[in-house]
Amino acid sequence: MAKRSLCSLPLVLAVIIFSVCDSEQHQSSEALTLMRITRLLNFPTVSKSLNNYTDFCNFEVNSSFAVSCYEGNITQLHIIGEKPAPLLPRNFSIDSFVTTLVKLPSLKVLTLVSLGLWGNLPGKIARLSSLEILNVTSNFLYGTIPPEISSLTSLQTLILDDNMFSGLLPEGLGSLPVLSVLSLKKNLFNSSLPSSLSELESLRLLGLSHNHFYGELPDFSRLTNLQVLEVGDNAFGPQFPKLGKKLVTLVLRKNKFRSSIPAELSSYYQLQCLDVSSNMFVGPFPPSLLSLPSITYLNFSGNKFTGMLFENSSCNAELKVVDLSSNLLTGSLPKCLESDSKNKVFLYASNCLATSNQNQHPLPFCHNEALAVGIVSDRSKRKQASKAALALGIIGALFGCVLLFGVIFFVYRRMNANKTTKKSPTRSVTENASSGYTSKLLSDARYISQTMKSGALGLPGYRTFSLEELEDATQNFDTSTFMGEGSHGQMYRGQLKDGSFVAIRCLKMKGSHSTENFMHHIELIMKLRHRHLVSALGHCFECYLDDSSVSRIFLVFEYVPNGTLRSWISGGHPRRSLAWTQRIAAAIGTAKGIQFLHTGIMPGVFSNNLKITDILLDQNFVAKISSYNLPLLEENMEQICSSSPGGHGVSSSRCVTSSTGARKKDDDRTDVHDFGVILLEMIKGRQVKYEAQIEALEDQLQVALTADDEARRSVVDPRVKQTCLDQSVKTMMEICLRCLRKDPSERPSIEDVLWNLQYAEQVQDAWQGGESQSSEGSPVSPSQPPRLTF
Ligand SMILES: *[C@@H]1O[C@H](CO)[C@@H](O)[C@H](O)[C@H]1NC(C)=O
Ligand SMILES: *[C@@H]1O[C@H](CO)[C@@H](O)[C@H](O)[C@H]1NC(C)=O
Ligand SMILES: *[C@@H]1O[C@H](CO)[C@@H](O)[C@H](O)[C@H]1NC(C)=O
Ligand SMILES: *[C@@H]1O[C@H](CO)[C@@H](O)[C@H](O)[C@H]1NC(C)=O
Ligand SMILES: *[C@@H]1O[C@H](CO)[C@@H](O)[C@H](O)[C@H]1NC(C)=O
Ligand SMILES: *[C@@H]1O[C@H](CO)[C@@H](O)[C@H](O)[C@H]1NC(C)=O
Ligand SMILES: *[C@@H]1O[C@H](CO)[C@@H](O)[C@H](O)[C@H]1NC(C)=O
Ligand SMILES: *[C@@H]1O[C@H](CO)[C@@H](O)[C@H](O)[C@H]1NC(C)=O
């Protein structure tokens, strides 16, 4: 073995050049290892050009395949595939691949990018004890990061971006003494961060964006080298993280931060990029940030920042982008930001600034909202008010507002006044929805979450319909438009003037109530708009002429044309069957709908008694929940009824004697159980109707889970078993079983369910190699051959 050291360049981070000395006769096992690696990776062209006589130490086919040595041993290996890389075939084994890799014990730098690697990264990767840089971006590695990684004491850079890693980060990561770059972006990590991360004193860059991390960030104030912290698109919060002062880039966008911005941020003299957009930050916007000496990019949009801007504020001359839109700012535009320069961007729409530009709200809007998000000087008052709101549910919510604003006291009195109160004076049938209600106040308050705002896709705005309009739409409620009847009234299909179809539920009222008595229900219904709910489009009151009390209420819902989910799963039509990917998509849609019902509105709507027949599919096979615990009706408000709007004659209507306001501890887990039953039917492709049946199928799934993938597949609906990936099936079965647990507290949260489903979807999509998605639009007929054959 030759040991002439003609070239002893120091190994510098990310420097790839290592020249090599005579390795002509260097015939170590390393050459064979390299050849084996290229073969395992399906690099036929490269492996052909490699043979026993190749000077592999100087082997560089092109930038995407390079090897470097030091004194005859391979120290660097860079293999970069084309993007997007197809998954390596089924007979690929990450385990034997890593076993081969570790035969290169001198490896310090390992780049395996876009190679289609898939599987659980084995812990034995830690046998590469000299490893300094590991970059496996854009592969399909899943499971958790092996804890053994913490024994790689030389590791400086760990980049696992764009894979499918999930679960917890190993506690031991925090003990890596020289780790300076840790980047885990675009994975499926679903945990809080280990506090040990706050001990990584060498850390320069921490990238965690696009995951499902949650909880508070650890205390980073001791990480004096930290320059880049990117944690966008997670669920971190609510407190602003504790940070060191040398930060250059701080990205907190799209999380759940709800605190205010700490004052010390104004002393971060190296800060160049600050993005806190799309959170729920409150408190005053600190204008001093505009004049930080290094700042170039500031994005504060989509929060609840308050306070005044002044014309005379000063700004750093290098400032390129400032986005303050969608906050509650008042005052006038700082002169220093208004520039005609093309390469400067200043956005400030949807505030209450004194300018006619960019769509400003009237000043009271910001004041009211600021009150609603709790920016009042008297904190104790606010606490009391919000406690009251929680306790009293819908009515209480209204009550809370009354306390805060004192505006709608009148309405409140009416709703709670005893039944003998005299009715409201004459009121026309077509009362005007856009005025009069408290909706403005309510929707401005904190009750409406971001999910709700973004969820109502492509629907016309909620409005009041006139009775004439509904009569026209249904040809005077002709029997041909009749869709079904439940205990609370009939369902009609109608076509509006603009050609769109709607489903109209007609509810007969007993007793005499003025329209105002229903307003708070209507308020709630207005908010129940989401892509995955059959959403309300409007309502119409029909009143008696004599005393103007309400005789009928019409609720107008979107019409969902494609029938129930069951009809596409187990309905017995041979041609109607959803493909596996469509089933996952429908499951995700349903779960999102449930999530919205639970968390998208305040107070949440729970115990919806969901059935597979309550899930409807629209023309694009988007799943929509048609029956939810809709609190309307009943002069006595103790009984809250769920009525089933929308679509295809499904019109069950049932009463649940529970109050939406006071929720029990595991209320949300009842829906999770119902969802489990729906999943079960989607996996099995057979109708599930009785409790006993559920248990039998549960057992079957339980056994299948621990069996091998062939056995597992045999349990799945035969019409999809050819096209589903085992990893995906397994995930679906697992989550299904967890949903069905007897003890509600053992059932997963709806968020957990959603993550698992999305994981199942991603693995499946990845497996299908991003081929054209025929899933949107027409369902794949069962006879269609599987897209991939292994
Ligand atoms: C390369 O070496 C292996 C084992 O050392 C040997 O079996 C093989 O024949 C050699 N190939 C060539 C092309 O010399
Ligand atoms: C590098 O070479 C390999 C093997 O010849 C080839 O498949 C790949 O497309 C090349 N990549 C680039 C970027 O030229
Ligand atoms: C090269 O590898 C061999 C065998 O693994 C080892 O004994 C030797 O010390 C390595 N040389 C260097 C310079 O690391
Ligand atoms: C995997 O299968 C392909 C063909 O299906 C074959 O060419 C390749 O050698 C196999 N790889 C391994 C590691 O067995
Ligand atoms: C890791 O790989 C990605 C993708 O090729 C590349 O953009 C990035 O610069 C690499 N990072 C390091 C430190 O090599
Ligand atoms: C600020 O952030 C929001 C959301 O995170 C984004 O939509 C917007 O484009 C950003 N503004 C600028 C100017 O980059
Ligand atoms: C800017 O103007 C406001 C009032 O318009 C004034 O109160 C404040 O002192 C001024 N600040 C500076 C730095 O001139
Ligand atoms: C995270 O996701 C994995 C895989 O989907 C799942 O097994 C695990 O229970 C999840 N963990 C948490 C805390 O949600």
Image (tube, rainbow, N blue to C red):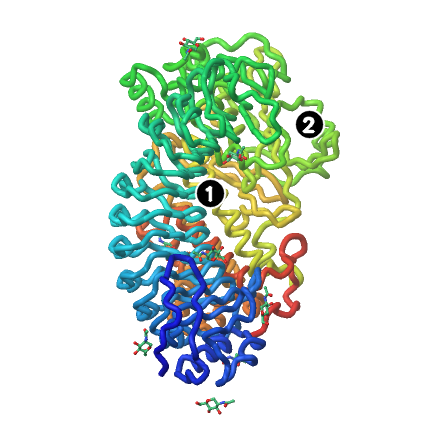
Q: Tell me if residue 441 comes above or below residue 727 in the rendering.
A: above
Give percent across and percent down for residue 215. 32, 42
Q: Nearer the viewer, residue 762 or 383?
A: 762
Q: Is residue 598 visible?
A: no
Q: Quadrant of the C terminus?
A: bottom right
Q: Which residue is mark 1?
A: 594
Residue 703: assigned label? none
Q: Is residue 373 left or right of residue 628?
A: left
Q: Using the image, determine if residue 231 lies above or below residue 314.
A: below
Q: Where is residue 456 shown, x and y percent of the image?
A: 56, 35
Q: Residue at x 52, y 80 (%)?
A: 50
Residue occupying the point 57% across, 14% down: 355
Residue 157 placement, left or right of 523 = left
Image quarter of residue 433: top right
Residue contact between numbered discs 2 and 1, judged by CB atoms under 8 Å: no
Look at the numbered disc 2 and give the secondary structure of its residue.
helix
The residue pinned by badge 2 equals 470
